[in-house]
Image (spheres, helix red, strand yellow):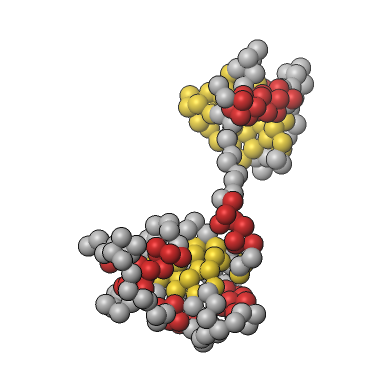
Amino acid sequence: MTNRSAAACGLFLLAFTHHLASQTSSPTAADLVVFGHIWTGDSSRPWVQAVSVVGDTITALGDSTWIASAIGPKTRVLANGKDMVVPGFMDGHVHFLSGGFQLASVELRDADSPAEFTRRLKRYAAKLRPGEWILGGDWDHERWPGSPLPDRSWIDSVTPKNPVFVSRLDGHMALANSAALNWPVSPEPAETFPAAPSSEGRMVSRPASSKTRPRIRCMRSSRHPRPLNPMQL
């Protein structure tokens, strides 16, 4: 076991051990009760039948009959039978370079509507010189009513002099405006911008003309190396 893994297990062990409660009295009324074959991480008591939670805190672990006494009219109950239940290992991380660049770019992650998405791009573009690219963004269309994918028609009028290539927060979709699609593309050696495979058309959600395909490949290669699927044009 690596030092990092040992530290993670130690933290979970401490968390569960801290909340192991005496069963001489009834547990506190719970917001959530989970039944199942529950691993605690405590070597002296590795398995229990149920766990109760109040708010964001584990308040008790024990046998199913005792924990059941914490169930009230508003308690959410997850009955997992004999299925195994374990602590969740949460992975919070940042990609150092792209995360750093994003801090200096337009912030679209918490834009809650297409109108706000467009407004932020307009405001950011107003600070740039003509021809400067707008990249990053990290937009999330699932925050918007109806979850529509963004369209370049939303932003063309507010970014006429700046090419835009802004990505969804997962990096698998991006929006390019007309200025980006019409950006001059100099002939490049084949080894720099290889010919698109026959399946490339499937990455574009709207038909791409022979004029725009080279620009799409250029933006993918030089501006955004991660796979994009689909790209809204």
Q: Residue furthest top?
A: 44
Q: State the residue in front, 211 or 166.
A: 211
Question: What residue sits 65% from the left and 18% below the top?
Answer: 42
Q: State the residue in front, 73 or 35.
A: 35
Question: What residue sits 63% from the left and 14% below the top?
Answer: 43
Q: Residue furthest right?
A: 25
Q: State the residue in front, 2 or 60.
A: 2
Quadrant of the rendered structure where residue 66 is? Answer: top right
Judge whether residue 51 can be spotted in this image.
no
- Where does residue 100 sit, x and y in percent of width and height? 62, 57
Q: Assign the N terminus to one quadrant of the image.
A: top right
- Where does residue 114 sit, x and y in percent of width and height? 54, 75
Question: What residue sits 72% from the left and 36% below the top?
Answer: 57
Answer with left or right where residue 7 lies relative to residue 158.
Answer: right
Q: Assign the C terminus to one quadrant of the image.
A: bottom left
Question: What residue sits 48% from the left and 24% below the top?
Answer: 82
Seen in the picture, residue 12 relative to 199 is either above or below; the reply is above
Seen in the picture, residue 36 relative to 44 is either above or below; the reply is below
- Where does residue 207 sit, x and y in percent of width and height? 29, 75
Answer with left or right where residue 231 lies relative to residue 163.
Answer: left
- Where does residue 188 sit, x and y in percent of width and height? 33, 69
Judge whether residue 56 can be spotted in this image.
yes
Seen in the picture, residue 162 relative to 88 is either above or below; the reply is below
Quadrant of the rendered structure where residue 70 is? Answer: top right
Seen in the picture, residue 158 relative to 69 is either above or below; the reply is below
